[in-house]
Image (tube, coloured by chain):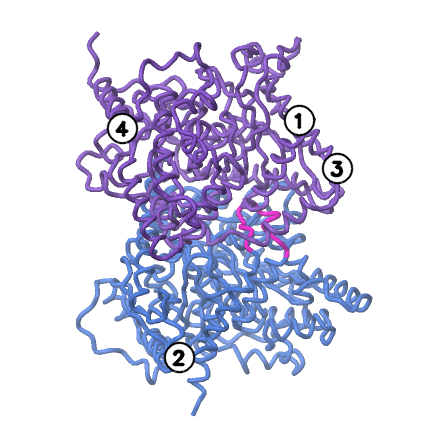
Chain colours: A purple, B blue
Amino acid sequence: MTLQPWQQLAAAKRESILNAIPPKWRIKGPIPSPEEQRDVTGPYIQQFLTPREIEITETDVVGILERTTTGKWTAVEVTEAFCHRAALAHQLVNCLHEIIFDDALATAQALDAHFVKTSQPIGPLHGLPVSLKDQFHIRGVETTMGYVGWINTFQGLPNDPRSRVFESQLVTDLRAAGAILYCKTSVPMSLMSGETVNNIITYTTNPKNRLLSSGGSSGGEGALIALGGSPGGFGTDIGGSIRVPAAFNGLFGIRPSSGRMPYQGAANSMDGQNTILSVIGPLARSAGGLMALFKGVLGTGPWLRDPLVLEIPWREEVERETRELVRGEPKALAFGVMYHDGVIGLQPPIERALRIVEETVRGLGHTVVTWTPPSHQIAVDLAERAYSLDGGADVAYHLTLSGEERAAQVILNLAGTQKTAMEVAALNVEKREYQKRYMDYWNSTADLTGTGRPVDAVIYPCAPQASTVPKRLATVGYTSFINVLDYTSVVIPVTHADKTVDVVREQEVFLSELDEKAQREYDPDTYDGAPAGLQIFGRRLQEEKILVLAEYLAEKVKAASTSP
Amino acid sequence: MTLQPWQQLAAAKRESILNAIPPKWRIKGPIPSPEEQRDVTGPYIQQFLTPREIEITETDVVGILERTTTGKWTAVEVTEAFCHRAALAHQLVNCLHEIIFDDALATAQALDAHFVKTSQPIGPLHGLPVSLKDQFHIRGVETTMGYVGWINTFQGLPNDPRSRVFESQLVTDLRAAGAILYCKTSVPMSLMSGETVNNIITYTTNPKNRLLSSGGSSGGEGALIALGGSPGGFGTDIGGSIRVPAAFNGLFGIRPSSGRMPYQGAANSMDGQNTILSVIGPLARSAGGLMALFKGVLGTGPWLRDPLVLEIPWREEVERETRELVRGEPKALAFGVMYHDGVIGLQPPIERALRIVEETVRGLGHTVVTWTPPSHQIAVDLAERAYSLDGGADVAYHLTLSGEERAAQVILNLAGTQKTAMEVAALNVEKREYQKRYMDYWNSTADLTGTGRPVDAVIYPCAPQASTVPKRLATVGYTSFINVLDYTSVVIPVTHADKTVDVVREQEVFLSELDEKAQREYDPDTYDGAPAGLQIFGRRLQEEKILVLAEYLAEKVKAASTSP
């Protein structure tokens, strides 16, 4: 069969990524199929690593920084270990778009030389390898954002002088903080998908269960970090693109409110659509890792270089006050809990995860409030309309550059009707009114908590599923309403789908046809082993508070699950 | 001549405002013409007041609050004095749309009773009369925003249950802080004008020189406060609507960055246009007054009730650090100074005002940097395009409700073409890129200041004119670029046009045809006595810093002008 030009281009790019892996790090022999080897984390990937590499790559962000900022570990050794493991990860689940190992090792050498000379780290992220979703421009490599038409261009523009030279602000800021950039991770074409699929790397599978998806759009981040190929990295989220991969891969991830992390100079879809802004946030294997990455960027003062970033440094006093609350008496806190969105109910693994957290909260003596806010469906509809303001023209244009096929999982109608300026304005008003109603509801819970405050945070799924079979993601509505509200949301890992307990429910009544479809689609054996995470969300710009609460809940959930 | 129905409606509303003034406060006999009595401030208006009323109404916000929050003055006495003086002000310059004296006095009585009972103020603004631009809904009265078609409606909607009942959030917050709402002030129809003209109150003239304009769109606020009819009040600003009236009336005024003051539930034009958001800010006769009003609102936690307000309380530490800087050594600070926008130069009074401030800064030993940013004309053009995204449809619709004539001073084309969603997005990108360029320029001045920091603030006109003859406002470009940048800007009074020194320049070379027109239009005699103010602007969300710097500069300018 003759390949189309775009298929040839994609295949060549796909090969070039594999070829960038040093031969010594290539897996000999065929990679087992997902059916043969679902789970490639833990012992499976460890077989290719030395004990020292395993020690380094299984240390979390906080542990690594304790060592690299004090000279206990060199940046070179740490970087090399993560490069090796990332190379393995890519061969197992297709999670990389760009490999920058040589440049990363050169940076690591420079950092080590600096430390030898000064006995000081150059910044709070000194020597930490950090992975980035393929929306961020890093010198030396290109950015495709999953589009074949962006290969050998700058965001689709041929012969642009910025190509392979220009760096996004987040990249500059991370470098200033001492981070080492060594790879870029896979995304779905257009970013507008809860699965990571494109014509270059094909599909990023879930490392815990390769029959399933790594989520999207920051699916490469999710898969790479879950495999230990990165201690932490940055994704973006306009409808769930940080939270869905975090939940599907058993990670922590934060969708901050807009205006905290610098988006300046990053590639994006529908740039300038400002009804709902995409935001940047870290993913990592610990809440502490999220905090370190978040604080590391804030510490550079990104508001001095990105006009959309707010001058809000990390608020130590909020962190401190929240830590006092979680150390306090029973009933110090109040959490909202909500089991479904009224349209699609939870498959058994996620329902169980939510019960685990709810019981943990009750067991700690805190108040649980049944969360009955203004319908999330209103927000889901607002979000869909915001994503579709241009009628799909931007994404259609970038697909047309190469003539490539669209993935079925892209959630946009690419032949829609563009809206008018007055319709944009009307949508902005509708959105604000929904935000106001939700805010009023939140305030009203002060009467129910017994703490003197409204609910501190809400515990809610990221999706009704623990990951998804390809093309079977039931909805992004469990995450996109948060983008309408511009709330802070932190994902925590809770448990894993377990075919022995998460059996098919006897169920004859459903919330909707979509619910029936989603429930019937659930198969305990297929989903067995998939991570089941949840989001803990708070009000706008409450990153410090929600990170502390998420860390606290995750620790307590873990302690409960490991106690005899 | 038979009046059109809209003219009858407007005349009846105009009469009803006058009729709401108690007979005892009506000026007997005819009001002198502007030609007979240009300046109605000071002795002119004082002739109608008792010495005690003069004492109260000529005390600034800070002075009043010192007394009303400690029981030295009763809220009733203070309120009554301002009601009286506001009634006089309206008869002299047409600055009120609504009179709420009875309700205000009832509120004052309740506050006094509270104080008698508890010996405590109910909030930081206890007993302070505060005037509001006629965009804010206050129970008991209506909101016309200058539209005849809004008379007897709620924002143009007949029979709406919110009419005369619903209150804007700012109103609720001010009440919670203890403020007393006693009047609403005039605005131009549509708000999109630098003069205050509508078919209801006709035209709000400048109290210092009634041949001239009070500015707009918060022109009623400017005129009322300048006449002592209010100690301070709130306007809004999408292109200069706080700053132009503040400058034209010799007042202080702040345009904060978006997200600090609550706009929730206020009337507006082109609601939902979010490329450039209109913002709320106070006007007053002292910088301390601005701070008290700003802090008073922030102290209520408006971010809990308005989804667009940022959770940024008044930053005491920024205020403190800035106060340390201004108390410090010479060369502690660096100011940018820019004399014109490249298109329309300054008429002599404003040029002199700018020289006064520049010389004061130099005399204090601070650094002056010639400000050469990315062209302001780019921003002015972006702003005009943002205001015109709907092709003028919103304003045209509200004019059509009554069939009233538009004022020539409305700056919009009401028969323009509506833009598309993609054009809106492209404009948002252009705006962000301009903001980024300006930011980079600002950062670059760190090399020029000698302080180790970039320039602290920039001194710049609000308009090339010291007020304007009706229909002769040359441009709003001296203010609208700030709205594109979303910067903090505080207006300070500097001097007054003086026909003996601000003579016509011998000038044969002009910046442009518009400049030539503006310079030829200047007439020393006509403008004699008009206030000449300037803006001190800082970066985004720098309200605490810029308020302190503005207070400092205004004090030093005043000290220099009154020293022998």
Mark 3 falls on what kind of element? Answer: loop
**Magenta stretch: includes residue A456:** no
Q: Residue at point 35% right, 25% down?
A: A90
Q: Mark 3 lies on which chain?
A: A
Three-letter amino acid code of the residue under disc 3? Gly
Judging depth in this view, the residue of A372 and B46 nearest the camera is A372
State the separation of the CA atoms marked 2 and 1: 63 Å
Crowding around mark 4 (Cα neighbors within 10 Å: few <14, some 14 to 19, many 20+) is few
Which quarter of the rendering shows the N terminus of chain A? top left
Q: Residue at point 46% right, 79% down?
A: B36
Three-letter amino acid code of the residue under disc 2? Pro
Crowding around mark 1 (Cα neighbors within 10 Å: few <14, some 14 to 19, many 20+) is some
Residue B145 lies, in percent from the top left, at 52, 53
Q: Name the residue under label 2.
A: B330
Judging depth in this view, the residue of B112 and A542 nearest the camera is A542
Q: Name the residue under label 4.
A: A22
Can you name the residue that lies furthest to the bottom here? B564
Three-letter amino acid code of the residue under disc 1? Ile
Marks 2 & 1, CB-CB < 8 Å contact: no
Three-letter amino acid code of the residue under disc 4? Pro
Q: Mark 1 points at which residue?
A: A356
Magenta region: which residues? Answer: B300-312
Asked if badge 3 and badge 4 are on a common chain, one would say yes
Residue B14 in sight from this viewpoint: yes
State the separation of the CA atoms marked 3 and 4: 54 Å
Of the numbered discs 1 and 3, the one sitting upstream in the chain is 1
Mark 1 falls on what kind of element? Answer: helix
Q: Name the residue under label 3.
A: A365
- Main SS of the magenta segment? loop
In the figure, is residue A341 to the left or right of B241? right
Asked if badge 1 and badge 3 are on a common chain, one would say yes
